[in-house]
Amino acid sequence: MARPATPKKPPIGLKAPEPSTTPAPVQKPETSANSVNEDAEPLRFAICHWLVGDTLVFSALDYDQNPPQNQHQLLANILRAIGRLNSSLAEPELVQWPLVTNAPGGEQEAKAMFSSLLRGRVEQSNCNLVLVMGQRAGQFLLPEEQRDPNRYPLSEQCQLVVTPGLDEMLADGATKRITWDLLRTLVSNANQ
């Protein structure tokens, strides 16, 4: 009858390695600069715009939101002050990003789409003034060099003015002054 094998003992003076109690490090999968961060919050916002006579106005909002009444009223007052609104201000046209819920597309796609929207609306309306209100709207509508509050000619007959946002003006009265300073030359030119 065969005898069961006995485990070999290490030679005297050497210890057998003890089993490790720490787990082996987990290798993370390689990611490239082009990979999408699935944990990132999806880009969701809206751009609303008004066509008031020969003036186009663009403003950014949170997704699935209309301009609050106080912002709507402030814009009406600004347009009246520069001689661009004689009656009540209609509701804006709203374009949301993404166009379809949970559609893929990031910041570059949104910029391409909204800058095309701006160009298309300017061409269709034959306007002579475009107001882009706020940094957030400017981020998606304008090239980098046109995002600071300032005036830019879009064409010989159309001027673009970047102002603080309606929400900023309501939160900080000093930004109303900045907006007025940007727009007052329009008022003086209209009165001549």
Image (cartoon, rainbow, N blue to C red):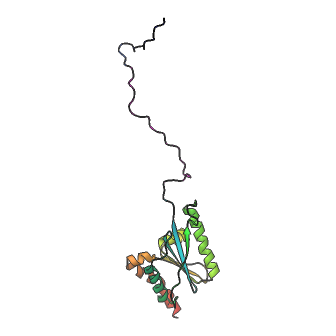
Instruction: Give the mark count.
Output: 0
Mark yes or no: residue 169 visible.
yes
Mark yes or no: residue 142 visible.
no
Residue extending furthest toward the right: 124
Residue drawn at 45 percent across, 77 percent down: 68
Residue extending furthest toward the front: 1
Residue extending furthest toward the top: 1
> Magenta segment, which residues?
16-39
Rendering quarter of residue 14: top left
Residue drawn at 59 percent across, 74 percent down: 118
Asked if 179 appears above or below 41 in the picture, the reply is below
Q: Position of residue 157 (x, y in %)?
A: 61, 84
Q: Position of residue 98 (x, y in %)?
A: 56, 65
For the residue pair 46 and 192, the one nearer the viewer reads as 46
Rendering quarter of residue 129: bottom right
Residue drawn at 51 percent across, 65 percent down: 44
Asked if 3 appears above or below 58 in the picture, the reply is above
Rendering quarter of residue 120: bottom right
Look at the image and say whether residue 25 sits in the magenta stretch.
yes
Q: Position of residue 156 (x, y in %)?
A: 61, 82
Look at the image and say whether residue 74 sits in the magenta stretch.
no
For the residue pair 30 and 2, the one nearer the viewer reads as 2
Please tell me whether the stretch drawn in magenta is mainly helix, strand or loop: loop
Q: Position of residue 31 (x, y in %)?
A: 53, 47
